[in-house]
Each structure stands twice: as structure tokens, then as C-alpha cells.
Image (cartoon, coloured by chain):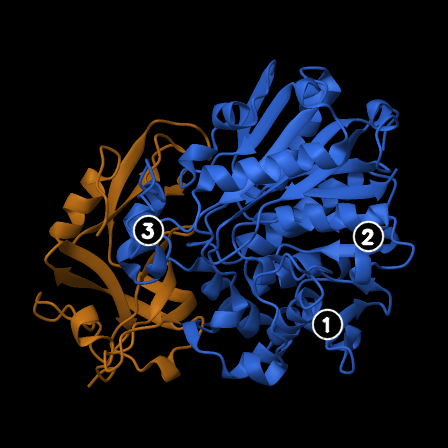
């Protein structure tokens, strides 16, 4: 699971509260992620943590080999539309692999396992307040794999 | 290139490359290094520089170990470099050109550690590396995403954006395997077809088993000196015409699948800006092929616009020969590349092969009148490329 160190602990703690927090430069507006010591745009130290709703689009994905009989895993790169230049590598859940398309809009959810709570993304469903895998805050995603029906 | 003196490769050597060598990593490097010094004709006692690839997963490849193992009496310069191995070659070339040493031994080795191979894990004599491989801060944040195999997403992005197909990537894999049949160093020499490629198991869809190099045991080495000193040695020297790298603003392929193509294009631009040669002057192409998608991106950077690699490969494909000949002339990875020699080589196999070709010493693989070679190395964040020419 994620290794946590002095530079990433606040981010990880935010995930445990189901908050996707990304730094933004107070001086030039650049979004900064993964965490960096200062703004790579203007070198300002004034970075402000900003909680995002988590709208995104799929940049690319792959389907890593899984044990026979296990549900498929979709491993995707997601660009956050609220924060240009910020991307996450996450699991894409709530959609059959055959239906995944590059550029598709995605919504943030959370995936919980023994190691902690992690962001994941799924298709924007009929009720955007209820992204897949995040409905009740219990484990979704990897365990039941993204094999669920989108919007069902 | 400019009027400066050039560095020259004067000796080459390698250990056995094998899935299971039955010896430790230090033995592999020492054997490759000894072979390179013997090939060069340089007296052992004259080797005064040692430069090696010293990855975090290869702890016994420290230059001091090599000095001890070879009994080098008076080394006055050492340095290390990360893969790809052309980085070590450039470090050695710079060392002889600045005069920090006269004759630099330069090596690269790789070993199937317990953490890099299932078989390795089952062998109690393959100790875990001293430093657990740590992909670093950014990777640590994203590894729960499921797959660290960033290149699979690079391949997907290429297919989606440019319409490339698995059959396009198959041409790279089959070309290399066809060439490997004539390379006694290669680990994977059994001929294969496009159909074999298409039937191979998926590892990280769209990437299949035959899109990637496999971990092996092995080491390779060269001896580098100045062009002037090279003239007094037995082999015709192979001159190092130019080096270059490119680190674009974004270098993490896990998050930026487009970074590798951009880095390749910039690196090729920087490389040929250092030479009077152009890509059209190159006789032998060695695009880095740790993954077929990387070879595709390097070939596009060398010869076409973005996304035009598949068309180049289709036009360059010989069904009779089961291999590529770019523009009807330029062969690709005449030794079979990393895909055939294995991940011990990380680009250094291309250096060894290019030297053999440019010396006119490549046996049944020899390409007539080959005088120039381009070797591209690595990907975004860790690339270095070189042009080698017959001296």
C-alpha cells in the first residue's frame, strides 16, 4: 500500500477523511500535485491545500492480469477537470472494461481496505452525488472489482 | 561534431546472458569486464578509470568491487550511472575527454533478484538487494491504482490517438526475434510470427508477454579511451559522435502517458544537433525496446511525425525475411534488442552490437558497409542516446 512519509502524510490523512486535497499556489494559481516543496511554476512557498469534488476525465488505462476467476481491474490515469495539470493513477470501477473509453468523464469515489482509504473513480452515473463505490463508505471497488454495472 | 577530440570504444565484452546463470552478479560483471579489457588490447595495469551502472537493485556492481575483482592496481577515477546503460558510456567518454582517466572500463549488469522474478524468489542464494527497490515518492502515492506498468497506458494512448494496432507492435517484436536467431548472445532465439505475438498472453492489456523484455542474469562491458590513443590499439576504433538526453517538464510516465513520446522527440533533436549527421545518414537503428511501445516512439522520433510509426513499419516490413528494413535500407536492432537479449542489457546490448557491426566484425549478422549507428536509450525521465561511427 501507499508508503507514507513527511511530504505525503497530510495528503494521505485527507484520504482517510475522504477528502481529495490538492495544493494550489496562492501567487500564480498553479495546481501542484503530487506534493512538492514549493510551486514549480513561480517558486512561491505559498501553497494552499484545496479540497476538490473530484470530477475527472480518463487519459489512458490498462487491464492488469489478475488471478483466474478474479474480477477485472481497470488501472487508469485520471485528469482532474477542476485542477488542470493534476492527474491520479487510480482504479476505475463500476464499468465493464469493454465499455471504458479514453476521455470519458469520471467521478471520485473511495476505496477502503485494510491499509486505508484511497481514491478511485467511476463513470458519472445518473445520480452524481452517488459515485460508484462511494455510496455508503464501505469497501467497493477493487474487492468487487469494477465488475458492477454502471449506474445500476 | 565539433573540432574537439572524440572518445572511442576500443574493447567489448560480455558474460553469458541467461535466465539462470548459476553465479552471483559480481561474477557476471567481472567476467564481462575481463573480456572487454582483453578485447581492447589495453594492458590491465593501464586501466585507470571504472564507470558502472549502479542501480538500486544492483548493489554489488559498485566500481570498487570491480577494481578488486580484476586486480586493477592504479585506478584514479570512478563514477556511477543509472540505467539506461548509455548513461554510463557517456560518463566514461566524458572522463577520458577531460583527462580524468586515460582508459575507462565501463560496465552494466543486471541480476534476477528475489524481488524481480518468481524464480528468483524461490532461490535462497539470490539474496534480496541491499536497498529495497523504492520507486519513490510519486509512485508511492499511486501504487494502489493497480498497475505500475506505465508503458501499458502509453501503448493504449498511442492506439487510441493514432489508431495503431497490436499487429503494428508485433512487427517490432518479430523483427527483433528474427534477428536474435543469428545472435549467439541472445536468450530468446526461437523464431516467432505475428500470429504468435497476437496469441501471447496479456500481461497488462493492451501489453502482452512479447511486448516486454524479461529479467535475466548478465553483464556487458566496454573500454573507452580517446580517439588518439585508440589508433594504437588492435581494433578499428568506434567513435562516439554525440550524446544527448531530454527531460521535459513532466517525466513521470505513470501520470503522463504522453511524456515518453515527447522526451524521445526532444532527445533525438538534441542528439542530432550535436552532429553533422542527420537521421537519414544512419545505417543501423537501435531504438530502445524494453517495451515495444518505446521502440515505436523512438522510431517515430527518429524518422516520422507522431503516430506515423505504424505506417513506417508497414512499409518497411518484409514478409519473406520477417524483419524490418527502414526505407528499404536500415535494419533495426540487428542483435534482437532487449526483447531478445533480456533485461540484463538495458540498452548496453545495442552498444556491443553496434561496435561489432561498425568494426565489420558481426559475423553472419554483418550489415554491408555499415558506418553509422544510432542507439536511443530509455524513456521520459531516464533517457540517453548516442550516435556511434566507424573511426
Picture coordinates of residue A48, whole percent (x, y): 27, 36
Label whose residue precedes the other's in the sequence (1 or 3): 3
Say which chain tag 3 marks. B
Residue A45 image point, x, y percent: 34, 27
User: Mark number for residue B115?
Assistant: 3
Q: Are marks 2 and 3 in contact (CB under 8 Å)?
A: no
Of A26 and A13, nearer the camera is A13
Q: Is residue A40 visible?
A: no
In-front residue for pair B177/B139: B177
Residue toward you, B271 or A118? B271
Label 1 or label 3, whichever lies nearer to me, is: 3
B319 vs B162: above or below: below
Q: Chain of mark 1?
A: B
- Looking at the picture, does residue B140 appear above or below residue B338? above
Q: Is residue B266 above or below residue A122?
A: above
Q: CA distance from mark 1 to mark 3?
A: 36 Å
Q: Residue at x 68, y 38 (%)?
A: B244
Q: CA distance from mark 2 to mark 3?
A: 39 Å
In the structure shown, which secondary structural element does the residue marked by tag 2 occupy? helix
Quadrant in which the C terminus of chain B appears: top right
The image quarter in which residue B43 lies? top right
Q: Hue of chain B?
A: blue
* Secondary element type, mark 1: helix
Q: Dot 1: few (<14), some (14–19), or many (≥20) neighbours within 10 Å? A: many
Q: Which residue is mark 1?
A: B313
Q: Secondary structure at mark 3?
A: loop
Residue at numbered disc 2:
B279
Where residue A87 sits: x, y (%)?
A: 38, 54
- Image chain in orange: A
Which of the 4 image quadrants contains residue A152? bottom left
Return the x and y of residue B367 as percentages of the image width and height.
85, 59
Q: Are marks 2 and 1 in contact (CB under 8 Å)?
A: no
Amino acid at each position: 500500500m501507499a508508503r507514507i512519509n513527511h511530504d505525503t502524510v497530510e495528503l494521505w490523512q485527507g484520504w482517510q477523511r475522504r477528502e481529495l486535497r490538492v495544493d494550489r499556489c496562492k501567487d500564480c494559481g498553479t495546481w501542484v500535485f503530487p506534493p512538492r516543496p514549493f510551486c514549480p511554476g513561480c517558486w512561491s512557498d505559498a501553497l494552499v491545500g484545496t479540497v476538490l469534488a473530484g470530477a475527472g476525465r480518463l487519459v489512458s488505462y490498462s487491464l492488469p492480469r489478475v488471478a483466474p476467476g478474479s474480477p477485472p481491474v481497470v488501472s487508469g490515469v485520471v485528469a482532474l477537470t477542476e485542477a488542470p495539470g493534476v492527474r491520479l493513477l487510480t482504479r476505475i470501477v463500476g464499468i465493464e472494461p469493454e465499455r471504458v473509453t479514453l476521455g470519458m468523464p469520471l467521478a471520485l469515489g473511495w476505496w477502503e481496505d485494510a491499509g486505508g482509504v484511497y481514491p478511485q473513480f467511476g463513470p458519472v452515473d445518473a445520480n452524481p452525488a452517488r459515485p460508484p463505490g462511494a455510496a455508503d463508505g464501505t469497501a467497493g471497488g477493487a474487492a468487487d472489482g469494477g465488475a458492477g454495472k454502471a449506474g445500476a | 561534431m565539433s573540432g574537439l577530440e572524440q572518445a572511442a570504444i576500443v574493447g567489448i565484452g560480455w558474460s553469458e546472458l541467461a535466465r539462470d546463470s548459476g553465479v552471483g552478479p559480481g561474477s557476471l560483471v567481472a567476467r564481462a569486464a575481463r573480456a572487454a579489457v582483453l578485447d581492447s588490447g589495453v594492458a590491465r595495469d593501464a586501466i585507470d578509470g571504472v564507470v558502472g551502472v549502479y542501480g538500486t537493485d544492483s548493489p554489488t556492481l559498485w566500481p570498487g568491487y570491480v577494481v578488486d575483482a580484476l586486480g586493477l592496481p592504479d585506478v584514479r577515477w570512478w563514477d556511477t550511472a543509472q540505467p539506461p546503460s548509455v548513461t554510463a558510456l557517456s560518463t566514461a567518454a566524458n572522463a577520458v575527454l577531460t583527462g580524468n582517466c586515460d582508459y575507462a572500463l565501463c560496465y552494466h549488469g543486471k541480476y534476477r533478484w528475489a524481488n524481480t522474478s518468481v524464480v528468483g524468489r524461490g532461490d535462497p542464494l539470490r539474496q534480496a538487494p541491499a536497498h529495497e527497490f523504492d520507486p519513490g515518492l510519486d509512485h508511492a502515492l499511486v501504487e494502489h491504482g493497480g498497475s505500475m506498468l506505465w508503458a501499458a497506458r502509453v501503448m493504449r494512448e498511442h492506439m487510441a490517438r493514432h489508431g495503431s494496432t497490436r499487429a503494428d507492435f508485433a512487427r517490432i517484436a518479430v523483427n527483433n526475434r528474427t534477428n536474435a536467431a543469428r545472435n549467439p548472445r541472445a536468450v530468446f532465439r526461437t523464431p516467432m510470427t505475428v500470429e504468435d505475438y497476437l496469441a501471447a498472453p496479456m500481461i497488462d492489456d493492451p501489453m502482452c508477454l512479447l511486448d516486454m523484455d524479461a529479467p535475466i542474469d548478465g553483464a556487458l562491458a566496454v573500454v573507452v579511451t580517446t580517439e588518439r590513443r585508440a589508433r594504437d590499439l588492435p581494433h578499428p576504433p568506434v567513435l562516439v559522435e554525440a550524446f544527448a538526453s531530454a527531460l521535459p517538464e513532466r517525466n513521470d510516465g505513470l501520470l503522463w502517458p504522453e511524456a515518453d513520446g515527447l522526451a524521445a522527440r526532444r532527445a533525438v533533436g538534441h542528439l542530432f544537433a550535436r552532429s553533422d549527421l542527420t537521421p537519414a545518414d544512419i545505417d543501423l537503428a537501435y531504438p530502445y525496446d524494453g517495451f515495444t511501445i518505446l521502440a515505436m516512439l523512438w522510431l517515430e522520433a527518429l524518422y516520422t511525425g507522431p503516430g506515423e510509426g505504424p505506417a513506417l513499419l508497414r512499409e518497411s516490413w518484409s514478409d519473406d525475411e520477417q524483419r524490418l528494413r527502414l526505407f528499404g535500407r536500415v535494419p533495426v536492432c540487428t542483435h534482437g534488442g532487449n526483447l531478445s537479449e533480456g533485461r540484463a542489457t538495458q540498452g548496453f546490448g545495442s552498444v556491443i552490437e553496434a561496435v561489432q557491426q561498425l568494426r565489420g566484425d558481426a559475423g553472419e549478422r554483418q550489415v554491408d558497409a555499415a558506418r553509422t549507428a544510432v542507439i536511443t536509450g530509455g524513456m521520459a525521465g531516464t533517457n540517453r542516446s548516442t550516435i556511434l561511427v566507424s573511426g
